[in-house]
Image (tube, rainbow, N blue to C red):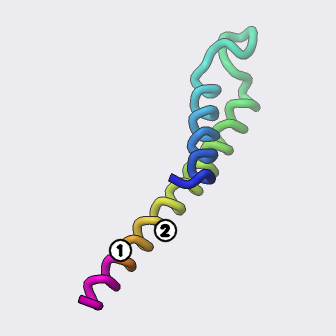
Amino acid sequence: MSMFMKIVTVIITLGVLYYLSPIFSNQGGATVDMRVLCLFFTAIGLNVFFTQSIRFVTNNLKVKSNEIDKS
């Protein structure tokens, strides 16, 4: 995994943990604004994560098909 992918994974994990944790405010949960913000960033992170992993897989498939063609 590249460094960029690791950073994105950490951001997603932090977003999910913050969303689930009930200790950040007096009401027994994160405020609505913060939850929306965390979900927004988590969605962006997941989007980037999946586009990167799909690109990685397709690049590997291209490399493998090129090797097969040469042999």
Is the magenta region chiefly helix, strand or loop? helix
Please report the bounds of the magenta region as a residue range: 64-71
In this figure, what is the number of numbered marks?
2
For residue 9, what is the image quadrant? Answer: top right
Q: Is residue 61 above or below residue 15?
A: below
Q: What is the x, y in percent for residue 24?
A: 72, 16
Q: What is the x, y in percent for residue 49?
A: 54, 54
Of residue 27 and residue 56, the one placed in the foreground of this image is 56
The residue at the point 50 percent across, 57 percent down is 50
Residue at mark 1 = 61
Judge from the rendering whether residue 66 lies leftward or rightward of residue 37; answer left or right: left
Q: Is residue 18 above or below residue 12?
A: above
Q: What is the x, y in percent for residue 51?
A: 53, 62
Q: What is the x, y in percent for residue 4?
A: 62, 53
Cα distance, mark 2 to mark 1?
10 Å
SS for tag 1? Answer: helix
Task: Count residues near mark 2 (Cα–Cα under 10 Å), then give few for <14, some for 14-19, many for 20+.
Answer: few
Membership of 66 in magenta stretch: yes
Membership of 27 in magenta stretch: no
Residue at mark 2 = 55
Q: Residue furthest bottom?
A: 70
Amino acid type assigned to the residue bearing label 2 in the image: Arg
Amino acid type assigned to the residue bearing label 1 in the image: Leu
